[in-house]
Image (spheres, rainbow, N blue to C red):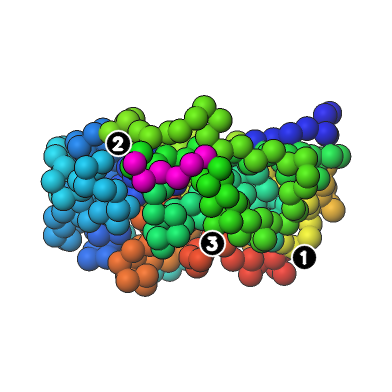
Amino acid sequence: MITDFVFNSQSVTAGHPDRMCDIVSDALIDAFLRQDPITRITAECALSKNVLFLAARYASDAVVDIPETARNALQKIAYRLQDFNAADCTVVTSLIEQSKSVRETDVSALEDDEMDHITVSHQATVFGYACTHTPDLMPLPIALANALARQLFQARKTGALPYLSPDCTTQAGIEFANGKPKRIHSINLIIGCEDSGAAPTTVQMEEDLRHHVIFPVLANATIQSDNLTKIVINPDGPFMRSGPRAHSGMTGRKGDSDTYGCFARHSGSALSGKSPSRIDRVGVYAARHAAKNIVAAGLADECEVQLSYSIGYAGPVSVLLNTYGTGKLDDGALRKRLLRHFDFRLGAIVRDFNLRRLPELHHGSFYQQLPVFGHFGEQGLALPWENTQQALLLQN
């Protein structure tokens, strides 16, 4: 087994067209659940130039202006009007309003044995992963790439680097020795500028980015850069065209940066645009929660939890656990502890994480923040699946 290698993960800022579509799709989830927590809804969109195509299927008591909700979400990304005008863009919708009788069951009112009647409506195999690379138990390459993307967006939003486009890409390369992060091998930033006339020189841009983006992120990194770390900015030269005017976007195409940066397996399904009835979203959160608690308990240095669901069943038909030889106990023994202390039934996941009332508890904006801040890790949002309160229970 090769244990010395370099691994790269990439991320994008909120203004990348794919990420914009994720934000819009989840903004609709927030809008519906805020008014009617037992809404059933799926939403996805595609974006190009000044056209947004939005498809949604829902059953709800909520009254939501879907095009206006989409526009409001896009306006917060704050493109210049000549690059993308959220207020005037064409919004094409394909909406299917279903009978309110097919809304979800309020699981908070159910007894525990009644959870067996809340069955999944989609087949899915989902994965959760955790490791000791970072304090929030995420793989270091994607943690660093995501942190750089967030810092880029903040540097533009606060006015520190006003010439930045909302659409930038980051990549972090980590050198591993004996399977552990050893050093930062490289940082690669693809930076868009909104106005060629206002763009600084290459030398000034590099200095700006080091001061306002790279150094603040590295200050909180678990390992530091060194004299051999390669910091590359726009290797193909100035990048003046970005965002929807340059390339299109679609919901669910950034699954690598949504999850583990390809360092670990993920289901491949989109996370955004799905209400808590969809096991291919909430099951991912449950699997991450389980894996993180195993590692937080000190029972393994890394852990992958796999859950397989079939239509018509309340819980997974298969639960697998793999610690890749780092477990303090046999994987079979750890799996037994997992099944003893975690409930992977759909209804239980929705109940235990309070998934239907998170938009209301966060002033109407929760799910739409996940594509920007990250579905995993502790980056300012109180994510219920990131808590490690069950780590102590797993000791027995």
| Quadrant including the N terminus | top right
Q: Relative to 285, is 49 above or below?
A: above
Whether residues under marks 3 and 1 lie with C-beta atoms below 8 angstroms apart, the answer is no
Q: Which mark is residue 244?
A: 2
Q: Which residue is mark 3?
A: 379
| Label 2, label 3: how far apart the Cα atoms are | 27 Å
Task: Count neighbours of disc 3 (C-alpha within 10 A) and say few if under 14, some if 14 to 19, many if 20 or more.
Answer: some
Given the image, on which type of amino acid does mark 3 rest? Answer: Gln
Which mark is nearer the camera, 3 or 1?
A: 3
Given the image, on which type of amino acid does mark 1 rest? Answer: Gln
Q: Counting residues from the N terminus, which is met first, the one under dot 2 or under dot 3?
A: 2
Q: Which residues are magenta?
A: 197-202
- Horizontal relation, residue 392 to residue 325: left or right: left
Q: Which residue is mark 1?
A: 395
The rendered magenta stretch, by its main secondary structure, is classed as loop
Magenta region includes residue 13 = no
x then y, percent, for residue 289: 59, 57
Given the image, on which type of amino acid does mark 2 rest? Answer: Pro
- Horizontal relation, residue 173 to residue 277: left or right: right
| Label 3, label 1: how far apart the Cα atoms are | 27 Å
Which mark is nearer the camera, 2 or 3?
A: 2
x then y, percent, for residue 101: 19, 53
Quadrant in the picture for residue 377: bottom right
Which mark is nearer the camera, 2 or 1?
A: 2
Q: Counting residues from the N terminus, which is met first, the one under dot 3 or under dot 1?
A: 3
